[in-house]
Image (cartoon, rainbow, N blue to C red):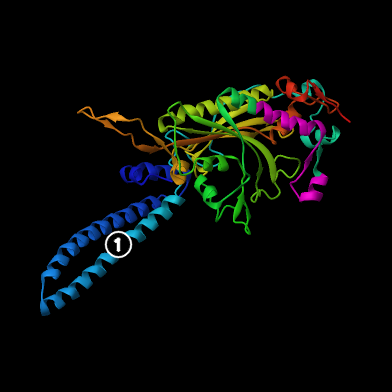
Amino acid sequence: MIDINMLRENPEKFRASQAARGADESVVDRVLEADSARRSAITEYETLRAEQKSFGKKVAQAQGEQKQQMLAEVKDLADRVKDADSRADAAQATIDDLLKALPNLIIDGIPAGGEDDFTVLKHVGQPRDFAAEGFEARDHLEIGELVDGLDMARGAKVGGSRFYFLKRDIARLETALLRMGQDLAMDNDFIALTTPTLVRPEIMAGTGFDVEHDDEIYRLEKDDLYLVGTSEVAIAGYHADEIIDLSDGPLRYAGWSTCYRREAGSAGKDTRGIIRVHQFNKLEMFVYCTQDQAEAEHARLLEWEEQMLQACGLSYRVIDTAAGDLGTSAARKFDCEAWIPTQGRYRELSSTSNCTTYQARRLNIRERLADTTTADGKAKKGGTQTVATLNGTLATTRWLVAILETHQQADGSVVIPEPLRPYMRGQEVIQVR
């Protein structure tokens, strides 16, 4: 959620942010109008309440007909007090509704526009030239079938379209990838978590997802619970309504979970293989830090994602996502897109988002500020302030697509990237069966 004080002081920044996202700028003015109405109603309420208290003393001293007349005036005054209070509450409810729907303020300098308006920050690695090696690359599904590691037909039989079974060495490769990511995270002071995949509606909404209108989210209506599309949701809720200690630096978690997405808007897209599926596994980084640490921490998350991609021997690019392609809670997002040989293009494998204070404000997560000393030498207890949150993906099932296609051999076997081999009991190649 947006800080109303910040919006009141810098409305032009929020209008510009909305414009860059291609979103409605007028919502900023509606918030300001409701805020003005609320403050006016509160002033009126406080003035009338003071008058009411003063008038009450006069009534107590009055006698006879004068008292009856004054009692009638007291009733009218009480009605006016009640009306002012009601108008203040209604204006506050309007503000809350508007702020909940208002996306995060973008960070200055990110590209404006939609999905195709990103800025490429860098390319790393050279896509493999299969033609020069004398054979045509197979796609990941064909490879998966050759090594008996991917069964889409039985996945569809059991769960419907966009479900699958990973088998044998490909199932092990997925686990190896996630374990390697978990070790990298733990080497950098992350706390490992296995997270719930079902969350309550207030946690889903608090993270920034629109539970009423987001068709990507699976809901269990009988239980009023939601299946998560990322462990970010569960970890964001982990410290909801808490004051956390950040005196020793950022608090970092690495959440391992199964994730679920409807892929509601992807009819006919990526129907072959496991690029776009309803269920997958993911290792997600999540960070709580002070507001002034957020941008530096964002750069670190990107660096760790790149270390994983390089360990997997993948060619990739990093993009600065355009404002109109950001999620509601993100102020800035970097995507890492790996080269998929059979598609001849880069596809997103991981992303990292700086959500500034947006999620923490909705979930009421704060940090305790240090105590201070006043001018006369007296100790003053520190207050609290909203923390910043960030997230980033270290590995998902989709990474298998790039790994299998990039490291395939002419016969359909796959060379396992060396850093993954210790997690595969030293195995070097996934052989055709």
When asked about the image quadrant of residue 93, the answer is bottom left
In the picture, the quarter occupied by the C terminus is top right
List the single residue furthest toward the right: 433
Image spot of residue 23 (x, y percent): 46, 48
Q: Main secondary structure of the magenta part?
A: helix
List the single residue furthest toward the bottom: 65
Is residue 327 depicted above or below 49 in this figure?
A: above
- 131 sits to left or right of 364: right
Task: Name which residue lies at 15% across and 63% down.
Answer: 54
Q: Depth check: 238 or 315 in front?
A: 238
Type of amino acid at the residue the image marks with label 1? Asp
Image spot of residue 423 (x, y percent): 73, 24
When asked about the image quadrant of residue 335, the answer is top right
Residue 164 appears in view: yes
Task: Name which residue lies at 32% across and 62% down.
Answer: 87
- Looking at the rendering, the stretch of residues picked out in magenta corresponds to 153-181
- 27 sits to left or right of 279: left
Image spot of residue 132 (x, y percent): 77, 21
Q: Depth check: 414 or 186 in front?
A: 186
Q: Is 226 one of the magenta-colored residues? A: no
Image spot of residue 10 (x, y percent): 33, 42
- 343 sits to left or right of 72: right
Q: Which residue is mark 1?
A: 85
The 10 Å Cα crowd at callout 1, few under 14, some 14 to 19, many 20 or more, is some
- 107 sits to left or right of 174: left
When asked about the image quadrant of residue 313, the answer is top right
Label tally? 1
